[in-house]
Amino acid sequence: MRILDVGCGRNKFPGSIGVDRNAAGNADVLCDLDHFPFPFGDGKFDQVRAIHVIEHVADVIKTMEEFHRLLKPGGRAIVVTPHYTDFSSFCDPTHRWHLNSFSFRYFGADNAGFGYYSAVRFREISIRVKLLALWRWLGFELLVNAFPRLRRFWEHYLCYVVRGKVMSRRAHRMSSANRTAR
């Protein structure tokens, strides 16, 4: 399995090819993550991992399109980012984006009604939200992740009281034949 760890920093995923712009990390390939294409051919990877990276890039849409290009059809993208209600989303001055658990619906089959900016599609496997420890211990995190309607209610009405911590999203690249037409 070929894995690309985008923005790997010092914690490159074991067995992966690490790409980063910072030479102080453990990257195998140095490149600016805001300039496309990355120096790899189309469909070369089974998995693209972006752990605490997407909030740093200049253009989320172009970056997701690049992940789509790099993945084989059916390949898996794993994106982890702080939830916008967590302190860590705002305390790092290099964070450009503050996202919620619905931010990547745009790249799904129904494209949240705004799919005209990009034709790439991913089929969501899972979205998991981590909440602050108190809410995790009380079982609220389990409920938010088990019931999509409750997660939507939490995002719309409760997330500033019951704050989120981190989101992880796993999705498969949809092939060209499965994409919604523009």
Image (spheres, rainbow, N blue to C red):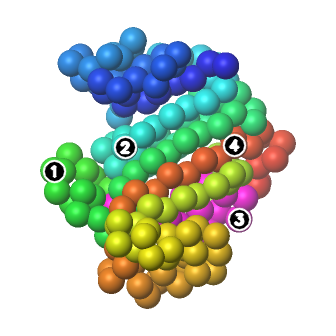
Dominant secondary structure, magenta: loop
- The magenta-colored residue range is 98-114
User: Separation of disc 3 and disc 2 at Cα?
Assistant: 26 Å
- Per the image, label 3 sits on a secondary structure element best described as loop
> What amino acid is at disc 4?
His
> What amino acid is at disc 2?
His
* Number of other residues with Cα within 10 Å of mark 3, as a class: few under 14, some 14 to 19, many 20 or more: few
Q: Going 27% across and 52% down the picture, which residue do you hit?
A: 96
Residue highlighted by disc 2? 52
Return the x and y of residue 91 as percentages of the image width and height. 17, 56
Residue highlighted by disc 1? 93
Q: Which mark is residue 172?
A: 4
> What amino acid is at disc 1?
Pro
The numbered mark, 3 or 1, whose residue comes first in the sequence reads 1
Return the x and y of residue 143 as percentages of the image width and height. 58, 75
Q: Is residue 110 above or below residue 68?
A: below
Q: Is residue 168 above or below residue 77?
A: below
Q: Going 45% across and 76% down the picture, which residue do you hit?
A: 138
Horizontally, is 140 left or right of 20 in the view?
Answer: right
Q: Is residue 124 above or below residue 46?
A: below
Q: Is residue 35 visible?
A: no
User: Separation of disc 3 and disc 1 at Cα?
Assistant: 33 Å
User: Separation of disc 1 and disc 2 at Cα?
Assistant: 14 Å
User: Separation of disc 3 and disc 4 at Cα?
Assistant: 15 Å
User: Separation of disc 1 and disc 4 at Cα?
Assistant: 31 Å
Q: Which mark is residue 110?
A: 3
The numbered mark, 4 or 2, whose residue comes first in the sequence reads 2
Q: 168 or 59, which lies in front?
A: 168
